[in-house]
Amino acid sequence: MKSGSNLEKVLTAGHFAFTGELGPPRGAHAEEVRKKAVFLKGRVDSVNITDNQTAMVRMASWAASLILIQEGLEPNYQMVCRDRNRLAMQADILGACALGIRNMLCLSGDHCQFGDHPTAKGVFDIDSMQLISTVKKMRDEGKFLSGADLDGKPQIFIGAASNPFADPFEWRVHRLAKKISAGVDFVQTQCIYNMAKFREFIRQANDMGLTEKAYILAGVTPMKSLGMAKYMKGKVPGMDVPDEIISRLQGVARDKQAEEGIKIALEQIAEFKEMKGVHGVHLMAIEWEHRVPEIAERAGMLPRPKV
Amino acid sequence: MIVAKRKPFDEIMQLVKGHKKVLVVGCGTCVAVCLAGGEKEVAVLATELDMGRKLANNPVELGSITLERQCDREYLAQLDGMVKDYDALISMACGVGIQFLAERFPDKPVFPAVDTCGLAVNQDVGWYEERCRSCGRCVLGLTGGICPVTMCAKGLYNGPCGGTNKGSCEINADQPCAWFNIYERLKAQGRLDCLLKVQPPQEWKDTTPRTLIQPGYTKPEKAKT
Amino acid sequence: MRLNYPSNVKIILVPCTGKVDVIHMLTAIQKGADGVYCVGCLEGACHYNQGNLRCRERVNHVRSLLQEVGLEPERVRMYNLSSGEGPTFAAYAKEMTENIQKLGPNPLKKKAGVA
């Protein structure tokens, strides 16, 4: 075991993993985290805690991760390269591990321009690929990025994100390969809507042997409404929403759109369960944590394995 | 002006080792003045490459030319007829020129022979000191004409920090403390009031690629080629 | 004074060693010269104040360039003497020639395409 995290145990035991996501509040109320956590507890193997997502300031992801541990859930601590330099990152990794955090997701982070402090200077001292290899070096070699020895290796299950849909498509699988060779243990993908393209991506990853080197969790975000689908299609960079998704949502009454969105997600999850090279699903129910129990139940994900 | 430093020879050799016909392109403006990539430096590099490749039993056919500037289309156009005769280009211009050259000849590999080091003053022949980071929000009017972004190692807007040491910076006794100098200069000018107000966080303008269109000018629908 | 100095030395006259540029020395080696040395006035006695000092800097630069390229830096040297020192001139020519003979011929001469 590299970290002994629940997520690692579930995956190494060969179970189909199911992870969730929780965005920390824009304020100091720990209660907000606890309230959302209730819906996720027992329904997912690990919960991603976002790090200033979309460049909006929120409660620190390590802090919200600790609240989650207090509530008996397992966090997957997200860290973006945008907000801290290599000193702060390594310090946070040590601190997070010391307080019981065992999973980490290494990300570049959205540009500051998208958030609530658009004129902030992005740090980007190192990038996500370099962050992955930094964590691996700390964990496996017991060394800082500088090469100096550290005392007490951080036991972290190392994660990264992958977007199978951004251009150029044929390069995506090679970028995944780079992350895996940098030291990633598991990968969570961008929200998938274009199943044909994702099947092709996974086929390439299978052919290259990548799915044997790291666990791949397919990203699913149920559409809450037609408006959300149109926004995702038109406004979110790197998102691929095919017309058939839009027309399915258009084809039902407004008050049935959320149900239709969940149905689409359930169909996807059913396919992922059978798909060679996919080891789990990462459910990003954005500001929809209260629907996770229902989705988990209907997707046949419950009960979660005890490992 | 923009200053640059010639890359180590081994690095350049490595970059072009697979190419048999190479054109070395110098720039006659900033990098010529700072003795990094003008006509003379082009001649030296071409001679070095010729000798180095012969000694490595991998001879290379070299051409060399120094343009007035590599950051202007009209000068790059001089190369249009000759580039087809080479399988790679080496540019000795600053990073701006290198990219503009590569943009004009997208099917040719373009390799840099210099590292661009910043915007600097000419203290003496061969001696240059950085003065500007082109942040896009100049505060020199409040800081006695001394840039805190460039000249303070921490880029502080409300200095000096506690590391100032008898006029030197904490990083190095030979590095003057920018904020000590700002204080001294403003004091001599009777303008210390400039420093009393807290300077708010900078609204950074250099975090995305910038385009500048001067008043009275417009960007054409389709850029000229 | 009828002094003998090795006949393989080819003298190129310049008004001041400050006139000698890096590319001159480098090109000589490129074209097959086994060695290049500059003979300037004594340091501190340059008619143009800095000429011989500049030459020394350039000689040092050429030596480092030769090293980068893979040739012996000893093929290039700087000497200083005053204009009245004929015997010293001959001695330097002899010393340089001996040093170069120890190094052997310029390896570039064996390579194709060297003029």
Image (tube, rainbow, N blue to C red):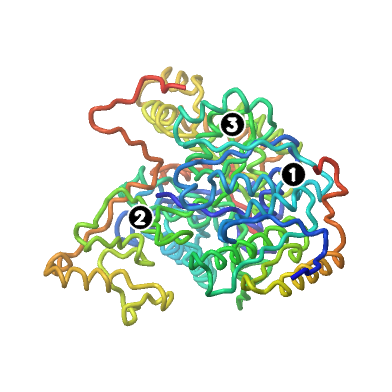
Q: Which residue is mark 2?
A: B132
Asked if residue C101 shows in the view, the reply is yes
- Could you tell me how far apart the alpha carbons at marks 3 and 1 are, in whole angstroms? 29 Å
Same chain, labels 2 and 1: yes
> What residue does disc 3 label?
A168
Counting from the top left corner in percent of width and height, residue C6 is at 82, 64
**Is B68 on the left or on the right of A159, as rendered?**
left
Distance, label 2 to label 1, CA atoms, is: 36 Å
Where on the picture, by quarter, is residue A142?
bottom right
User: Is label 3 or label 1 in front?
Assistant: 1
Q: Amino acid at mark 3?
A: Pro
Image mark 1: chain: B
Percent coordinates x, y for residue A244 in the rendering: 51, 20
Give amino acid for label 2: Cys
Using the image, determine if residue C47 lies above or below residue B104.
Answer: below
| Residue kind at label 1, given as amino acid type | Lys
Q: Which residue is mark 1?
A: B17
Q: Looking at the image, which is closer to me, C90 or B23?
A: C90
- Nearer the viewer's eye, disc 2 or disc 3? 2
State which chain disc 3 sits on: A
- For the residues beneath circles 2 and 3, the answer to whether they share a chain is no
How crowded is the residue under tag 2: few (<14 C-alpha within 10 Å), some, or many (20+)? some
Residue at 41% over, 41% down: B209
